[in-house]
Structures are given as structure tokens and as C-alpha cells.
Amino acid sequence: MATPPNRPAAKPPTVKEQRADKRALQMAAFKKQEQTRKRTRRFGIIGAIVALAVVIGVVTTVIIVNANPPQSPPLSGELKDRVQLYPGLERTHVTTSVTYSQTPPAGGPHNPVWLNCGIYDVKQQNENAVHALEHGSVWITYDPATTTAAEITALEALTPTSYAILSPYPGIGDQMAISAWGAQLRFTEVDDPAIQEFIEQYWRSADSPEPNAPCTGGIDGPGRQR
Amino acid sequence: MTRPPGRIIAALVVLGLLLAGGGFLAGRAVAPAAITPTTDSAAAGFLRDMQVHHAQAVEMSLLVRDRTDDEAVRQLAYDIAVSQATQSGQMYGLLEAWNLPQASPAPAMTWALLPATDGSESGHHVDPTAPSGMPGMATADQIAELTAASGDDAVRLFLTLMIAHHQGGVDMADDVLARTDNSQVVSLATGIQRAQKAEIVAMQQMLAERS
């Protein structure tokens, strides 16, 4: 049996043809529905990915923001190379004289009574001054034999008005020093910018054993000027 | 076009999430910078200078306690010494928490010369005659005088110096309140003012009774 050629249009579709047309229509509608569903699903997936990214971003940011800053700001270039650090110094109270490992001392065993902070024009007892260092003070020392009056005036000007001692220290020559508990900077010029950097880093620093303990109410050494 | 609302809802949800997430991120990134004062802020300057101011109040209070048997004065001095030492520690701790040096990059009271941010004319309580320019600070000579005094003389000198010292503290707190929104500094400065104003009244009365 040969397949018939194009059917005349006037001829009504057979039942079989009608069924096929209906099925085609249903198929098209189903495909469309399926497409819409797919697109919705795609949006859902994209949305979920974006939401996940946002959540990860927020969590990461919160962790970074809440991370503890470093305990003390890192030492900057020049000061870092020049400052001498003495970790693990002893903190016992003694009433005898002490032989310190550094000259002038930058911490160690000390007298129970601390030296009152201020400007002195006479050499002070190491054991009292070291106790002031334990309380967060800085101690600036110079050799009276090699330091001019103008240099002493400049040192007085850069000595903080509290928690700081300025005193002569015979024998150290042209190597002036600024000391804190466990840290010391030697310098030969009073306008050395590292002195200010040292003060910013160590004056009443949390690195000292007892920051904010007093630097008054101890003893006035001889020759107190201010 | 059977289900346009589904797509729109999905798009809106994504957009909403993006906006909320982005806003939150931006907020987190910006907020800490806004709430942590910088090293040259009035808040940081106040915390540094007020520690020096308080340290002198502690010193004077302990000096007078060693120089008199006047129980009312000894009690007041004990109160001032302990409360101001505590406040000093709070101020020290705030600077540490903000990772700022205790040492000031500028001379004392420079922060009080900054323009007020609350629109007021409040502040500029800088006293060039006082040590460090801080209002109410006793001079080294006055501290030496108190150290050398005893009995009722020491009490009268202490009360006179401490009334001026407290007034200076109230003025410094005024200066910072006009220049910061930091809640911790505002609460500290307000507390300092309240305590010291009350103590000024008490000390004026004590001084009148002992003159």
C-alpha cells in the first residue's frame, strides 16, 4: 500500500490525526511549563549561590574586623635597629646595692622605694630609679662631663612632665641613654628623632611590669629641680 | 508567560539579599573606623591628659592623708585617691584597647583647641599658667608646700588646691564632651563631672568650717 500524497484541505482530519494534533499541543504546553520550571530553578540556584557568597563574605569580614590588633604597634625602622631589648629581667625588692648588667640599668632587682619622677641635677641611686622604670617611667641619662648646658636644656624640654626622670650619669661619655623597663636607646645627639619614637613606644607602656603604678609618693633624690 | 511572578520573586529575593549583604559588609567595614578615635582626636587627648591630672589628685590626696588626723578629710582623700586611680586605669585601658600610644603626639591640651563639634563655644579651657596648660593643676611649688605642711595648714591648703583641681577637671570634661561622640569617653567624662561637682560643694563646706 502506497502512502497517499498531500491530502486535500477540505477533507476533515481523521480521528487519528486529531489525536496527534492534540498530543502535539499538550507536548508544547508541557515543554513550556518545563522551561519555566527550569528557569525558576536556575534562579533559585543562582540566588542560593549569591546568598552563600554573601554569608561567607559577612562571616569573613566579621572575623577580620573582630581580630585582636597586635599587642603593641611594631617598632618602626630606625628605632627597631637601634633599641636594645632586655627581656626577662628580675623584679625582686632588695635593700642592698645591685650590680646591673646594663649601664645605666634598664631594669632588674630594685629598692622597695621608687625614685619620684622629675628632673635632677645630681646622680641618682640606680636601685630607686629602676623601681620607677618598673612603674612605666622612662629615664634619660647623660654624662655631665661631656654634655653642654644647651644640650641639658634640650633634654629637659623633651622629658615628659610625668613618669620621666632626667639625671646625670657620670662615666657614660657621649653615649646618652633613654631607658625603660627592658629597653634602652643610646644616642649622641639630643635632637635625634629616635628619642621621641622611643617615648611614644615605651613611656607608660603596657610592656612595663606595672604601668600606671605611681611615680610620685616615693622618695625625692638629691638635687631635684622639677 | 504562565508564571512571571516566580521569576520576579526570585530576582527580588536575590536583589534583596545582595543589598542586605552588601549593606551589612559596608557597615561592618566602616563602623570600626568611625567608633575608634584616632591618636590626634579630642577623645584620645583627653584620656592622656586626664590621667596626668588625676595622678596629681591621687598624689595630693595621699599627701594630706599622711599629714592630718582630721577624719572627715582623710575619708574624702581616700575616696578621691581610689576613685581617681580607678578612672585613670579606665582611661589607660581605653587607649590600649584602641591600640593608641599613651604618649601624646602633641603638647598637652592641644586637643581642647580643636573646634567644638556640638556647635557650642564650649571648651578651650587651656591655662597657660598651669603646668602642662591643664586647668587646675597645682604647680611644683604648691606640691612642695603641701609636702612641707602639716595638720590644719595641710588640710586648708589641700582643700584649696583640690577645689581648683576639681574645677579644672570639670572644665576639661566640658571640653571633651563638646568634641566627642564616643560613648565610653562621654560616660567617663560625665561621671567625672558629676563626682567632682559634688565634691567641690563638700570641700567648700569643709574649708569654710575649718577657716
Image (cartoon, coloured by chain):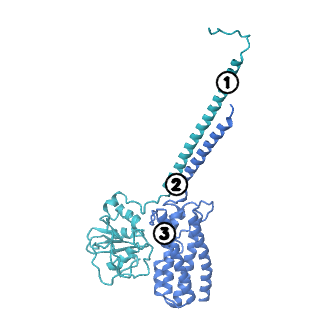
Q: Are marks 3 and 2 in contact (CB under 8 Å)?
A: no
Q: Which chain is blue?
A: B
**Which residue reaches farthest front?**
A1
> Which quarter of the figure is the N terminus of chain B placed in?
top right
Q: Is residue A1 above or below residue B171?
A: above
Where residue A62 is drawn, which disc sits there?
2
Q: Quadrant of the C terminus of chain B?
A: bottom right
Pick whichever, A115 or A100, lies toward us. A100
| Chain label for disc 3 | B
Question: A150 above or below A47?
Answer: below
Q: Quadrant of residue A48?
A: top right
Q: Residue at x 35, y 57 (%)?
A: A77
Say yes or no: labels 3 and 2 on the same chain.
Answer: no
Dot 2 alpha-carbon crowd within 10 angstroms: few under 14, some 14 to 19, many 20 or more: some
Q: Quadrant of residue A161?
A: bottom left
Q: Amino acid at mark 3?
A: Tyr
Q: Chain of mark 2?
A: A
Q: Which residue does the numbered mark 1 point to in the structure image?
A: A23
Measured from the top left, where is residue A156 in percent x and y?
38, 70
Return the residue at label 3: B92
Q: Colour of chain A?
A: cyan
Q: Do callouts 3 and 1 mark residues in contact (Cβ within 8 Å)?
A: no
Of the two numbered discs 1 and 2 on the same chain, state the one appearing first in sequence: 1
Three-letter amino acid code at disc 1? Arg
- In the rendering, at what x and y percent does residue A69 appear? 45, 59
Residue A120 visible at all:
no
